[in-house]
Image: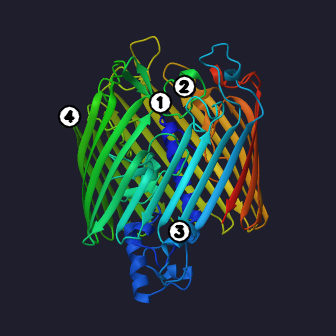
Amino acid sequence: MMNEEGDASVVSAQSALLADLEILYHNPININTATREQILRLPFISEAQADSLLLYRQQRRVFRTLGELQVISGIDYSTRCQLSLFTYVGDTIRRKTPLKHIIGRGKHELYNTLHIPLYKRAGYTSPNPYAQYLGNRLSHTLRYRYHHHEGVSYGLTLQKDNGEPVAKQGFYPYDYISAYAQVEGLIPNVSLLVGDFEINWGSGLLIGNNYFSSAKSAITLVPKNKSVLRPHTSSAESGFMRGIASSIRWKRDWETMVFLSYDKIDATLKYDTVTSFKTDGLHRNFNEIGKRRTVGQFVAGTRTSFRQSHWQVGANGYYAHYDKMIYPTMKAYNKYYLRGQNVGGISVDGAWRNKYLTYQGELAIDDGAHLATTHLLQGKPFSSLTLTMQGRYFSPRYVSPFAETLQSGSRVQNETGILLGAKYQVNSRLTTTAYTDWCYHPRPTYRTNYPSQRFKYEAEGIYLLNENVNFQLSYRFNTKQQNVTGYDLMEYIGRHQVQFSSAYKQEKFQVNASTSFVVATTQTTSPEYGFLLSTRGKYAPTPTLSLQLFASVFFTDGYSSRIYAYEPQLRYNGGFPTYAYHGMRVVGQLQWEPCKYISLATRYGLLHYFNRESISSGTQQILSPTQNDLWIQVGVKL
């Protein structure tokens, strides 16, 4: 569950992490032939653990079973359980495979997902011709993926959102088409990727990722300063590069990465000037289509790094050019946003570790000589305790449109902060996690006219009663300053959330029950309260058939006391829906694999409000308190 001011970015981070893990789950790593880079792609594996695993393999030559992980130093029970989901013990003999087999005789996957809304939104009948939706109510996603264990993969994604037209208005046939091809290992130490891709360098101050978008992730995930080049495999229509990228490892310890990207991206124009960028990927009416692919974005970058067993350093640089002037309407909070046609920056990053300490950090300077820096130190004074400290400073004038790191604001700019956290395994049954995160914004931010500050705190405990039953209790609090409407004053607004959940798991059956209570406070209005009770279950009578159910009731005084929860999702789909006001939510999902080549799934969702006569507003409004959705997914695996 999420409750931070940056709800959208945190939820996006969680969804991206789940999507990446799902790909790894369906394409497990052969632990007997995996490279260090392949092992480190698993976010829960540290560099020290990867090195211990490779050293053991070198000494014993081969893993015979995953049970041997028990004797490797630094790999605890929890990590062994996670490794069993993403690795397997395979053959160590590397036979020469013809190129035509590598290109076409690997693993093919094709998934068709159809979303059928059983209702009509206002946009389909809007009297405004520019706001009226031009397509039908259906949403369709076609996702094709190919993977060969010797390092060749490629894929294609086509997506039509609800309300978008087909084969007109410049769509061929759909609004969104994404493709990639990646080659790793055919040429020793060379990786080449063409198409849509994502990049992360260092701590993300120039080119970032979204694994560390929440404070808790810095405590629970393993910090790594490394360059990451991966295909863009999701259906998100923004936040990726489009072009060509290559990574070359030379002299064993050196690596160089270069990329070139050009894409036409969505933006709102005033004459020939960009006033804002559009990132939701929706093109349902003439208003939205008028913002589609209106500005060209060229980006080039390079990184060179040097790695030894316990430390590494890297140097990075990028340059971006837009074919139209960018000049947002001037406000106090956006005075130092990206303006002009060009932007660039350079940075240096480093990492160091020993048995007890891990450090990672980055120092970046943009083309205006404005500074951003972040440093994270994680220590293990003994095996059951992990302490984390992160400090960051982003100049109010620092500009890097592709940056994403551990931050409280919506962008890497105008922030000074410190994070302190700890993870303590009390015993074999009880694990606790806690952190505090404070930050200061020296200039106005969105909805603040003056300098402001924020504070977050979270504490969580997980207790394993036995191998089948666990309990989880958490408390979250965050507060920030915000303008008081109608006055030249600021106030603190805050949220308290307590959540308790329990889970029971057997071989064929598992169930999770959860309850959440929220109090949203301000200094000028009465508190808002929210409550959610939910249960989620799965029954799999056979390895090829499973049924998942989710049911919840929620009562909140308003949107400020909203609550998030995870629902069962079809393969390659994810999300943490928002629950607000008074209502109930039911989801049922059935998955069946009649043979090893075909998978069939259907999902039904019902949302009903007790105290509302309509859902949403504007063109998205549904003139009913009830929303029914049906999804159908057909998968083919060869």
Comparing 479 with 313, the one in front is 313
Type of amino acid at the residue the image marks with label 4 = Gly
Mark 3 element type: strand
| Disc 2 + disc 1, Cβ < 8 Å | yes
Comes first in the chain, label 2 or label 1: 1
Q: CA distance from mark 1 to mark 3?
A: 36 Å
Give yes or no for contact between labels 4 and 3 (Cβ–Cβ under 8 Å): no
Q: Amino acid at mark 1?
A: Lys
**Residue mark closest to the camera, 4 vs 2:** 2
- Give the mark, 1 or 3, whose residue is nearer the N terminus: 3
Q: Secondary structure at mark 2?
A: helix
Instruction: Residue under label 2, please give it.
Output: 288
Q: Which residue is mark 4?
A: 368
| In front of the other: 542 or 109 | 109
Q: Is residue 118 above or below residue 134?
A: below
Residue drawn at point x = 61 percent, y = 37 percent: 563
Across and down, in percent, residue 107 comes to: 59, 66
